[in-house]
Image (cartoon, helix red, strand yellow):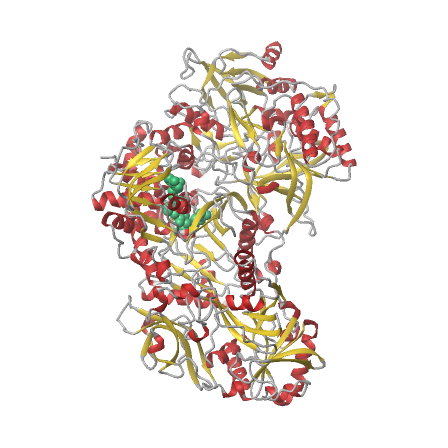
Amino acid sequence: MAQTYRLQDRGRVDLERPIDFTFNGKRYRGYAGDTVASALLANGIHLVGRSFKYHRPRGILGAGAEEPNALLQVESGPRTLPNVRATQAELYDGMAVTSVNAWPGPDTDVGAVNQLFAKLFPAGFYYKTFMWPGKAWPYYEKVIRHAAGLGKAPTDPDPDFYDKRYAHCDVLVAGGGPAGLAAALTAARSGARVVLADENPEFGGSLLSARETIDGKPAIDWVQATLDELRGHPEVRILPRTIVFGYYDHNWIDLLESRTDHLSRKPDDRPRQRMWKVRAQEVVLATGAIERPLVFVDNDRPGIMLASAARSYVNRYGVKPGNRCVLVTNNDGAYQAALDMQDAGIEIAAAIDVRAEATGPFTERAKQAGIRILPNHGVAAVDGAKRVRAIKAQPLAADGERLTGASRKIACDFVASSGGWNPTVHLFSQSRGKLRFDAETAAFVPDRSVQRARSAGCCQGTWGLMGCLKDGLAAGAEAAKAAGFPDTKAGSTPKASDDGFLPARWLWTVPGEQPVGHKGKHFVDYQNDVTAADLLLAIREGYTSIEHVKRYTTTGMATDQGKTSNVNALGIVSQARGLPIPEIGTTTFRPPYTPVTFGAWGGRDVGDLFDAERHSPMHAWHVRAGAAFENVGLWKRPWYYPIGNESMHDAVQRESKATRDSVGILDATTLGRIDVQGPDAVEFLNRVYTNGWKTLKPGMARYGLMLGEDGMVMDDGVTACLRENHYLMHTTSGGAGDVLAHLEEYLQTEWPELRVYLTTVTEQYATAALAGPNARKLLQEVTDIDLSPEAFPFMTFREGTVAGVPARVFRISFSGDLSFEINVHADHGLHMWQTLMSVGEKYDITPYGTETMHVLRAEKGFIIVGQETDGTVTPIDLGMDKLCSSKKDFIGKRSLARPDMLDPQRKQFVGLLPDDPEEVLEEGAQLVEVLKDAPPMDMVGHVSSSYMSPNLGRSFALALVEGGLHKHGQKVFAPMPGGKTIACTITNPVFFDPEGERLRA
Amino acid sequence: MKARYSIFSLARNALSYHENWQQAWHSPEPKKSYDAVIVGGGGHGLVTAYYLAKEHGMRNIAVIERGWLGGGNTGRNTTIVRSNYMWDQSAALYEHALKLWENMTRELNFNVMFSQRSVLNLAHTQNEVRITKRRIHSNRLNGIDSTWLDPEDVKREVPIIDLRGGGRYPVLGGSIQRRAGTARHDAVAWGYARACSEMGVDIIQQCAVEGFDIEGGQVTGVRTSKGQIKTNKVGLVVAGHCGVLANMAGFKLPVNSRPLQALVSEPVKPIIHNVVMAGAVHAYISQSDKGELVIGAGTDAYNGYSQWGSNPVTEDTLAAICELYPLFRRMRMLRQWGGVVDTCPDASPIIGLSPVKGIYLNCGWGTGGFKATPGSGHIFADTVANNRPHPIAAPFALDRFRTGFLIDEHAAAGVAH
Ligand SMILES: Cc1cc2nc3c(=O)[nH]c(=O)nc-3n(C[C@H](O)[C@H](O)[C@H](O)COP(=O)(O)OP(=O)(O)OC[C@H]3O[C@@H](n4cnc5c(N)ncnc54)[C@H](O)[C@@H]3O)c2cc1C
């Protein structure tokens, strides 16, 4: 295919490297260095898609991040990407792009029927209709949903991966145009660590699209020289294709580097994108400016584009957007584009200038170049639906609010429009810097920085090239100095032109033949199809706050976030309300500047790395033994150890019985351990646990309940006194982190006077719990500790060796059976475990997992925090009021004295025996005392734990029941879905060894 | 009488180029005195005024809003509406609201797009399974629709989900409430404002309450940035700023105010139908009618008033989304924001009387009060009008922090969106 609109004599694309791509299935050719947009234009294509609401034909408006219209679906299959701006997508070989929101295609789009009803669809119409009949909304909604939505999400998992990096620097420079490059230069010369990022593949910013000179040479030579020098500084990091998208507190800046999207073949070993999280001492914002379109009737027709974009296509990409152009402008600067276009051989049919008098440096040059200027003219109409064919110009009335006199039709094949410029203040605003409205340029400019940042160049309202360079040099030097680097001599500013774009006339809506909204549409937000008439309607209906205007009309809420529309919308609202723009306000800019891939936010924290897995030192053994695992906090714990095809139920029954009959072994490594030391350690324990600790002697251990401030049980565990002023606290496996944070909070904020030091030592130990009548016999074979009941009573610990390695053995029990918990250094864990397993063979030692652990402890009526408790259970509710000392204060004590805590009707901890011993209640089942035929029914409690016990030979459960402590023997019912009811009797929760003979044996 | 909204009125107005629509609500200057002043023009405040006017005959009342209507959490939330709460008191409150949601569009003649697309709550750990089942049983016996889904059922409801949860936290099941869904948040504020205005309620925006006049323990007026207003009844409905206003009135509230954040993707064609909430990994997602994926993230770990939310929270949430929906990894975040949420120690709201006579409290909704909007306003209006708690509001009295009668929903949901 011939690229009819390609210029051979200018542009930065590589004419030696042709690139083939497809658009809506048809093959086209472009060159390396093209974007999809420039390549399409080179092939004479303007019509690329259909609009969101009205399905109007749409073309390419801009040449960069501001593009609202030309959104395309790139590729299909797993790598597909919806809503990609054609103006930023770099062309690669074999690239396949298609239009979004147009079926079958942008040329003949079925959705275009919407245009017939467009009159019924003003802003907010959906709030006023689809209400009848009452139940029909879901059907309306379905249709609406299918009509909305632009591109398609991928339907397959993403084959790419993403990366994240942290970086620190002295000076971050956002934007690689003249101001940014100059800033990077002076900062780098001072020796500062500089990060320079630009969203483009090439540095130079606006200079890439310009024909200006610096020091008498093409500006691009200066860009090259500057980059060469920057590359020579080892502390400078230059990041092309990297968008600075988020400015957070304390100069934390987020960048997104694109690494493979521009490549035809995606390497397997390279992340698609990398998110940089940069902490910068100082920041220079040099993000340039974005032109705004003029709001005239049917200003959305394909072929109508920003003047700066047209200039960019000609100068940077060597592409003519057409052969015959009409310029529509309200300012002098746009004539620069016209001159460049004329130089490239484009006929400038006319310049429609809304200014009463067309003056200014570029205007004068245009006049000299023979460009026909129609001053004080508006646009009466635009011809051509799928591509502009002609534009009708007509003189403006004196007030600028109507057209008068005779119109003339000017044939053209594209239109360049300029409504002035907006400094790109997004990052500045994200940093919470204050903006100021500059009436002369009708633009928001930075006023006061709140963070250590400064703006340079166009983004702070400096419009001439010379001024931008000067700004940049100064900003870079200032930033480096502020970061503690020596003053650098900025040297003399290179010589360049210094023109702005004024004079201008701020006519927010260019009147057409008929009043706004009557015929044709004056678009403000192209992507969301918001017109000037919509904004006026919002105000008429009382949605006057700019936030209401925005939300009611959706202006500025599309994927371009209003880059071209926000100020125009403000202007129109200000005019309609008769208030100056600063009183209307501006909406806050939020991160991100341009949309950022979810995958990049997630980085490598996906799959197995989503959350760290914690393993005990015996983990590999459990895996080999075929254990099924359960997530407990971050830990992977053996849940049960099925043999062969054994079901979970069968395995748990076997493990439970074997433990009670002989001996079982549990990996208890995961229990949290906190080392508590210091002269005030015992006082500290007294305050954080409900019971007293003063009498605990070295060598002894004690069970404790820890409450939250609200008096509710938050954790439990055994704490041992290792020696005077030195304790080892055990917490629940899942609660360890929270408990440590809770204790530290109290130590640091409430009791700074206590001399106590906490260290987590969970990872330092491996623990095996031996339980069952043969536990002692087995352990005695491998330890030098005297295990006899007299020498080693219940709730004490001893130190010695086990399996030849140093060990601390606790005689404590969570199973309710004779039990020893053996702690060794983590490194010895596997050795200890394997020794116990092989010596235990003769006792048929059985490894058991958390499920059997749950059964055994439930038989004994031991609670699990988080299962019997849920943050609403007090020690009194658990029948553990004896553990609450009346002699001292502790966290939660005061809350326990509140009237409701003493209410006898609170839910209390009980056992439950289903009438049918084969029936295992569902955990979570609700209990009622009075059955009704159908809900609602009054609930009196719920089942917290429920199992089949081989040791009791029946099912049993634990529950919390209103007033349950005094209801032993009474009946309750669990009404299940489907009408089944399970009757049970409330009992004491201790089912096994109520006297504790096994425990203390 | 306002013109009714309908397809016919749209057609009629199209003939006059939509130039004859009336204001949805009036914006008068404040009067010298009112029978009641509602502070806070969010959903809860507006609904309160609506029912005061509609059911209690109080027409000489005003809603006073510091910024713009609905600009607080009402316009910042992820709009999940459900009633499957665990405790009886909560279930009664949220179910009362859900019933009002079901008729809201017709009652207001304003399409709030209440979309009962069902809400799933996933369980990723054994403990979550237990708690979810407990909640379902409780819902059922309270007469609230709620059913358990096995993993395969979850997959049937949400075909794009990865049940392996990326491998780390597989989906073990979940609950579904089919009557639950989402609504258009702004429309709720606007619809009630329009209805209030029509009944003569003064809606005053850009007017901050800066203090109270209190004589002998009874409120006699509010001081605002637009001057002094006399009134004997003040409803405080200011969400994240309730602590600030309580302070002005001389009492304290057991509330933490923190930024909670949310974000949306670029709009795409329909890809996920239901609302899916995964508490363990913290990922809440639904798709708006416009096509944006609406994602709820977590609260910052510290108190603050920035409507922003910290960056690591965004990272964690999107990592979780990528785990459960690997196909969304290429989707892009378009916008992110925060709202200041007011959370009580038991994660339940405070509705009722305050230590100052004539000042009534409606706050503490934290991360999950949007769903309660109509119900909250309804029972609060009754409370304000009659100077005693509505029966549904009674358990949510401020006094519960003294008596200990807490309604702790933490167990039922990590975050109660
Ligand atoms: C990110 C996010 C996601 C959420 N997701 C959900 C969800 O999915 N489902 C759900 O049910 N809930 C959700 N919530 C919670 C929900 O948004 C709130 O609980 C609810 O909207 C509160 O409504 P409101 O009317 O009480 O408060 P708001 O809408 O915040 O209204 C309070 C108003 O008081 C005004 N005000 C404050 N101080 C003053 C003063 N001095 N004078 C006058 N006016 C004042 C404020 O400007 C504000 O407009 C979410 C919240 C956030 C932030």
The reply, left or right, for residue B64 in relation to residue B282 is: left
Residue A2, percent across and down? 65, 30
Answer above or below: position of A499 versus B288.
above
Give the quarter of the image for residue A740: bottom right
Answer above or below: position of B366 versus A755.
above
Q: Residue furthest left?
A: B57
Residue in front for this viewpoint, A645 or A713: A713
Where, quadrant-wise, is the N terminus of chain B in this rendering?
Answer: top left
Residue B241, percent across and down? 41, 45
Residue A495, percent across and down? 72, 19
Where, quadrant-wise, is the C terminus of chain B in this rendering?
Answer: bottom left
Q: Is residue B383 visible?
A: yes
Q: Is residue A142 visible?
A: no
Answer above or below: position of B204 versus A322.
below
Residue A632, percent across and down? 55, 67
Give the quarter of the image for residue A954: bottom left
Q: Residue at 45% x, 28% y: name it.
A: A570
Q: Residue at 28% x, 66% y: name it.
A: A936
